[in-house]
Image (cartoon, rainbow, N blue to C red):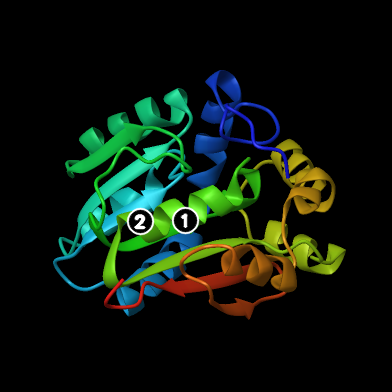
Amino acid sequence: MAKTDKGYRGISMEGALARWYATNTAKDPARFEKQIDDVRRLAPTGGKVLEVAPGPGYLSIAMARTGDYTVTGLDISETFVRIAREKAAAAGVAVDFRHGNASAMPFDDESFDFIVCCAAFKNFSDPVGAVQEMHRVLRPGGYALINDLRKDVSKEAVAADVAQMEVGALSRVFIRYTLRSFLPRRAYLKSEFEGLVARTDFRTCEIRQSPLSLDVELRKRTGE
């Protein structure tokens, strides 16, 4: 897979496209509730949490609202960083949203207790580098959780997921099209993700599959 300087594959999530995404993502609050449950399962109370590619920042803001975590978000999109900062301020919570590349994170070694990345990993131009960076900035014993679309997702799974979204008819058509067409081509099979992780210092991972997505759980062993 070719490595590029821009840090992502496909079109840039900036400007009007980023604002459209922010508006429509906000209409699916149940998704964030499930993600918070996953965070609580793995992240220690009082821990430092990093969300990689938070987009408009909804999950990071939800994590900060619990009062249980110190939250940082890192995104390649300047528009998303600006939107996320505005939304955090409006919500009255402190989240450190920063602009940067997932494969060259601007953080010291062992800075975080937990890392989460949702619905974005398939777009990274250097996926091995991004996972290796997660390992570098994660503290020993800490977990990283990556959730993303599976490459072999069925039309039925896409239809069921889109049907739950509270979006307009045109947005529904566009979302269904993207989830059925070019996004799966960027995504990974379970075996492909296992091979990718094997090239990093994590070496192994635990992967659970739903009809729509992969949940990839990584743990940095103590002593590393």
Snapshot quadrant of residue 5: top right
Residue 36 horizontal/vertical position (percent) = 37, 67
| Residue depicted at x 83% and y 68% | 156
Q: Residues within 10 Å of mark 2 (few under 14, many from 20)?
A: many
Label 1 secondary element: helix
Front-most of residues 107 and 67: 107
Residues at circles 1 and 2 in contact by the CB criterion of under 8 Å:
yes
Instruction: Count every numbered label the image shows and give the total.
Output: 2
> Identity of the amino acid at label 1?
Gln
Measured Cα–Cα span from mark 1 to mark 2: 6 Å
| Residue depicted at x 44% and y 31% | 80
Residue occupied by mark 2 = 136
Up-down relation of residue 134 to residue 211 (above or below): above
Classify residue 184 as left or right of residue 222.
right
Front-most of residues 86 and 54: 54
| Residue depicted at x 32% and y 53% | 50
Location of the C terminus by quadrant is bottom left
Residue 172 horizontal/vertical position (percent) = 73, 45
Snapshot quadrant of residue 223: bottom left
Residue 62 horizontal/vertical position (percent) = 31, 55
Up-down relation of residue 16 to residue 73 (above or below): above
Up-down relation of residue 20 to residue 167 (above or below): above
| Residue depicted at x 15% and y 60% | 67
Snapshot quadrant of residue 34: bottom left
Location of the N terminus by quadrant is top right
Label 2 secondary element: helix
Q: Residues within 10 Å of mark 1 (few under 14, many from 20)?
A: many
Classify residue 10 as left or right of residue 105.
right
Q: Is residue 29 visible?
A: no
> Identity of the amino acid at label 2?
Arg
Residue occupied by mark 1 = 132
Residue 132 horizontal/vertical position (percent) = 47, 56
